[in-house]
Image (tube, grey):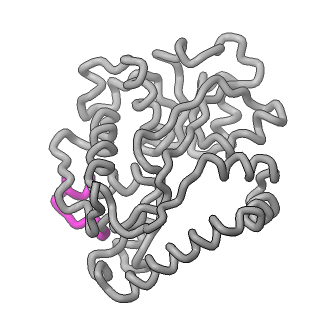
Amino acid sequence: MITSLQSNEIDIGIGLTEGWVAGLGKAQAESRSAGYRMVGTYVETPLCWAISTGANREDVTGVERLKGAKMGVSRIGSGSYVMGFVLADTHDWLSPASTSSSSASAPFDIIPLQTFAKLRESVNDRTADFFMWEHFTSKRYYDNGEIKRIGEIYTPWPSWHIVARPGVIGDERMEEMLEKLNLGIKYFEDHREEAVQYISTELDYSAEDAREWLKTVKFAEDVRGVRGSVVQETASVLKKAGVLGEDARMEGMIGIRRKE
């Protein structure tokens, strides 16, 4: 999506908060335009990342024993990678060296594996000891016995944000789109059973899981604007993970600011 924004193929994108902040911070470090700014908040609630291991891994029994373990990630800098540092920070496993810009000092042995399928394979064939992925996407594989769940951790920030190319910020088309998103969210909230039907038939979730997911997610009542504290907190964690350098700044990341 970032590449598409930079090449003017799309004007607006909706994606995970940490991805947008990482892209903006990296552009700053290279003294170039990121091609977008953050303009809206889509999902107010954090994302729940399940912590998983192999179904028959007797050696991996709980989160407290994961320090120094082999952590499978989709790629360096991804959400599955960044959340490892959130986990380590929560358990005070980050050494001073781990907060530098070098990912070599990570609190885990990092194993990039590209896909969710390869991550699931890795914890069973012992290429990795654990990985983290969104809870409800992982749940069907707990239910079928392929992997087992040993814990969970939430992002310390609202999970989904909206960005736009600088050329369309303030444009009436963007304002119209944000208002239509508001209307769509209101329709979704007012028609929960219709949402369950759609999710359970189109998105490979059971109706029961769809209902449970709906209990955990809160969309913004008004998507317009981004809180500075959210960007600051996200950038702070990305610095600890070595995704961003210590000189990353919040200035210029937000196109429409929301009151704290």
Horizontal arrangement in the rendering, residue 80 relative to residue 90 (left or right): right
Q: Residue at x 80, y 48 (%)?
A: 208
Q: Is residue 154 above or below residue 109?
A: below
Q: Which stretch did the figure color magenta?
A: 26-36
| Count of picture labels | 0
**Relative to 12, residue 90 above or below:** above
Of residue 11 and residue 223, the one placed in the foreground of this image is: 223
Instruction: Specify the quadrant of the image occupied by residue 135.
Output: top right
Q: Residue at x 26, y 54 (%)?
A: 228
Task: Give the x, y percent position of residue 60.
Answer: 64, 15
**Vertical side of 108 occupied by 75: above or below:** below
Give the dominant element type of the magenta stretch: helix, strand or loop.
Answer: loop
Q: Name the residue furthest front.
A: 190
User: Is 206 on the left or on the right of 138, as rendered?
Assistant: right
Q: Residue at x 64, y 44 (%)?
A: 116
Percent across and percent down for residue 183 are 54, 77
Tell me, yes or no, if residue 202 can be seen here: no
Q: Quadrant of the N terminus?
A: bottom left
- Counting from the top left corner in percent of width and height, residue 226 is at 33, 60
Between 194 and 13, the one lying in front of the other is 194
